[in-house]
Image (cartoon, grey):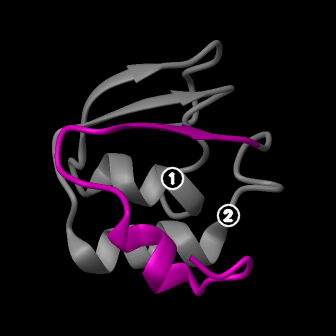
Amino acid sequence: MAKVITADEAAALINDGDTIMIGGFLGIGSPGTIIDALIKRNVKDLTLISNDTAFPDKMHGKMIVNKQFKKIIVSHIGTN
């Protein structure tokens, strides 16, 4: 595998039912292009480990609205 891959290539490594960790705070510092690629692929039944749920129209908040997670493990829920 190349040392640098595209967002689409990174998203292709994630399958239905996988667990993913997303950094940042309220979407700031989150990997937006990879998140958009995961939305495009419509990967489902994921488990999210993150600090928070972001905003409904930002970063992984868009994935929550799209119902791509079966479980979320976060320390802050309140904006979504």
Instruction: State the image quarter where residue 72 is shown.
Output: top left
Q: Nearer the viewer, residue 17 or 70?
A: 17
Q: Amino acid at mark 1?
A: His
Secondary element under disc 1, as helix, strand or loop, is: helix
> In the image, is residue 61 part of the stretch drawn in magenta?
no
Q: Amino acid at mark 2?
A: Pro
User: How many other residues sit within 10 Å of disc 2, few (<14), some (14-19) or many (≥20)?
Assistant: some
Image spot of residue 10 (x, y percent): 50, 71
Left or right relative to 6: residue 12 = left
Q: Residue at x 64, y 18 (%)?
A: 76
Image spot of residue 48 (x, y percent): 43, 32
Left or right relative to 41: residue 48 = right
**Segment tinted magenta in the rendering:** 1-23
Above/below status of 49 relative to 4: above
Image spot of residue 26 (x, y percent): 72, 43
Q: Which mark is residue 60?
A: 1
Q: Which mark is residue 31?
A: 2
User: How many other residues sit within 10 Å of disc 1, few (<14), some (14-19) or many (≥20)?
Assistant: many
Q: Residue at x 73, y 76 (%)?
A: 3
Q: Nearer the viewer, residue 8 or 52?
A: 8
Q: What count of labels does the image hold?
A: 2
